[in-house]
Image (cartoon, rainbow, N blue to C red):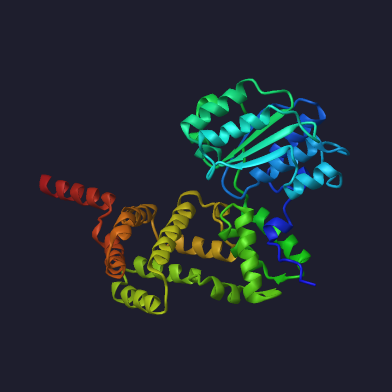
Amino acid sequence: MSEPKFKVSALKFRPQKFGEVVSQDFVSTTLRNAILNKKIAHSYLFSGPRGVGKTTLARIFAKAINCKNAKDGEPCNNCENCDEITRGVHPDVFELDAASNRGIDDVRAIQDAAKYFPIKATYKFFIVDEVHMLTIQAFNALLKILEEPPEYLIFILATTNPEKIPATITSRCQRFALHRLKIQEISDQLKFVAKEQKVKIDDESLFLISKLGDGALRDALGVFDMAVSFCGENIDFESLKEFLNLPDKDIYFETAKFIAQDGLKHIIPYFNKLEENGLDIITYYNGITDHYRNLLIIKTTDNTELLDESDVTKSKYKEQAAVYTGDQIQRILKILIDSEARFKYSSNQKILMEALLAELCRINREVVDISELISGLEALKKKSLK
């Protein structure tokens, strides 16, 4: 007998009810109330970043509407309709990936299928993912269905780029903008998954994986699965950093210290040592840019809660921000941002990085504070009038 096939965490722990969806409460509540009050629209548009629950909510909505034993607007997940929709084999729930089926013929196939009444369910569902990828001709064909849909037909359009969808389409949909998940929300979900999987993981590792998810729970769960494959059932921060090959935050604090101290003779050897140890230059450049962005946030707002960092790291940022003025940080950030295109086309990124570090070390020494210049001019003027 073969062993059961491994199922990734993003699928194994995919929400099956509105109440299980993380962070998108306003969408879940609205859809559930629409079912309870029998005020169901014929077309919906779910927009938002990747991995935040657009397709998941669409499937739950299809189950809840067609469930034979629905309670309080939630699907039972036990009846035949719920089971088949969960497994993706229900004859009345169609999913179309518009990224690979984007032509007019694909939409015409939907038109043909839409002519027939549901076989098992109350409503026939068409879930169109990445709908912004459809061609203009396909959008025009889709518009014909959305203008006068049959009573049994419901469309759910999902997209990461709502601005690319024609206004004629969006105006015929109820629109819901799903937002990125906060690090704490992702961390709480990862903690639950780790407990269910009997995996031990420390808080620093949870925070790092949650941050790498970049607002998408699915991406964070993908990193978590890889970490389990590498570390086993006990994930610790040092092993995780080694596995992900991420530079330590202290690298950027040390770099910023050298720049603040005009430490040109120290920063170049320091960078070369990092590069010899395998540090990716683009990763280093992006890390420095992000580091000074955080320093600017602290300097201008004095609000550490705006940083997606641990409490220990937040205190380090606050301490280092005191070394710089706001103008100094802005000048450094301008140089870093202006250099982004140069890195893209550079044939020798190492030399470019060394030159950039040298420029950053010199900038604050070469710029004279305007207030000091004005004071000097006024003193010279008074002296000449005597």
Whether residue 322 can be seen here: no
Viewer-proximal residue among 205 and 126:
126
State left or right for residue 144 relative to residue 263. Answer: right
| Quarter of the picture holding the N terminus | bottom right
Q: Position of residue 88 (x, y in %)?
A: 72, 47
Whether residue 122 can be seen here: yes
State left or right for residue 111 relative to residue 355. Answer: right
Viewer-proximal residue among 122 and 132:
122
Q: Position of residue 210 (x, y in %)?
A: 61, 59
The image quarter containing residue 80 is top right
Q: Position of residue 87 (x, y in %)?
A: 75, 50
State left or right for residue 44 relative to residue 298. Answer: right
Viewer-proximal residue among 6 and 300:
6
The image quarter containing residue 270 is bottom left
The image quarter containing residue 365 is bottom left
Task: In the rendered view, tell whether residue 131 sits above or below residue 356.
Answer: above
Viewer-proximal residue among 187 and 49:
49
State left or right for residue 79 relative to residue 307. Answer: right
At x 56% / y 60%, what residue is drawn?
212
Task: In the rendered view, tell whether residue 41 sits above or below residue 28.
Answer: above
At x 51% / y 52%, what residue is drawn?
302
